[in-house]
Image: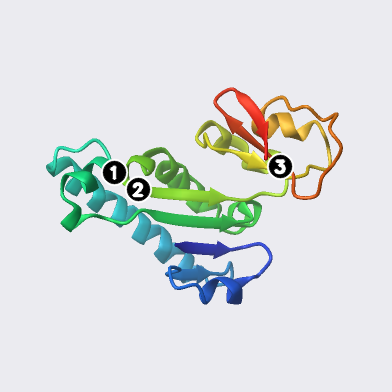
Amino acid sequence: ISVMDFGGRMRALFERLPHVGAVVAPDETERVYRLFRRLADDLERRKQLISEAGARDLYEYNASDPARALSALLVVIDNYAELKESFDSLVPALNALLRESRAYGIHFLITADRPVVMGSLFSIITGRLTLKQSDKGEYSAVVGRVNNTLEEIEGRGWVRLGKHALQF
């Protein structure tokens, strides 16, 4: 797991986890660019390995020979608005990674405080969830139409599953 901590600066919490490789803050410019380069390089390496093995994706590749299995990677970007504002030149690279990486076992978890911030990413990201929104109309932008007549329960959220919004 790599964490880009552009939100709450909870860095110390994540760094202690054994499966976290890096926690990068927005003021660590070189580390941000290095993480993107490393992700792009790893994606190309995985594409080549999986293609040479004749597999469709990472999971088929791993099943064909568990001894050479590759781990799935998770990249957490906390506060996309900050990334976009501070590293606007990386947005096209992020979009490319998002489009290509899922089959190769590179997954992203991206947070934003308002749906409008995500912009064109909504057309790329298929798995979406939301917690409480200040404007009830914003739920539909994230997960589709929801039933807002239910009483508010702390921790309730909505996830888009196919064409439906389901609560959790």
Instruction: Reply above or below: 136 against 89.
Output: above
Is disc 1 surrounded by few (<14), some (14 to 19) or many (20+) residues within 10 Å?
some
Mark 3: secondary structure: loop
Q: Do the residues labelled 2 and 3 touch (CB within 8 Å)?
A: no
Residue 105 has which mark? 2
Percent coordinates x, y for residue 112 in the rendering: 66, 49
Q: Earlier in the sequence, mark 2 or mark 1?
A: 1
Left or right of 66 in this view: 86: right
- Who's the residue at 52% across and 34% down the image? 126
In this rendering, the label closer to the viewer, 2 or 1: 1
Q: What residue type is labelled 1?
A: Tyr
Instruction: Reply above or below: 56 against 34.
Output: above
Percent coordinates x, y for residue 4 in the rendering: 54, 62
Q: Which of marks 2 and 3 is nearer the N terminus?
A: 2
Is disc 2 surrounded by few (<14), some (14 to 19) or many (20+) residues within 10 Å?
some
Percent coordinates x, y for residue 129 in the rendering: 63, 40
Instruction: Reply above or below: 1 against 116.
Output: below
Mark 1: secondary structure: helix
The N terminus, quarter of image: bottom left
Q: How far apart are marks 2 and 3 (CA)?
A: 26 Å
**Which residue has dot 3 on it?**
157
Q: What residue type is labelled 2?
A: Gly
In this rendering, the label closer to the viewer, 2 or 3: 3
Percent coordinates x, y for residue 33 in the rendering: 44, 63
Instruction: Identify the image quadrant of residue 63.
Output: top left
**Which residue has dot 1 on it?**
59
Which is nearer the eye, 4 or 165? 165
Left or right of 90 in this view: 51: left
- Who's the residue at 29% across and 43% down the image? 59
Instruction: Identify the image quadrant of residue 114.
Output: top right
Q: What residue type is labelled 3?
A: Gly
Q: Are marks 2 and 1 in contact (CB under 8 Å)?
A: yes
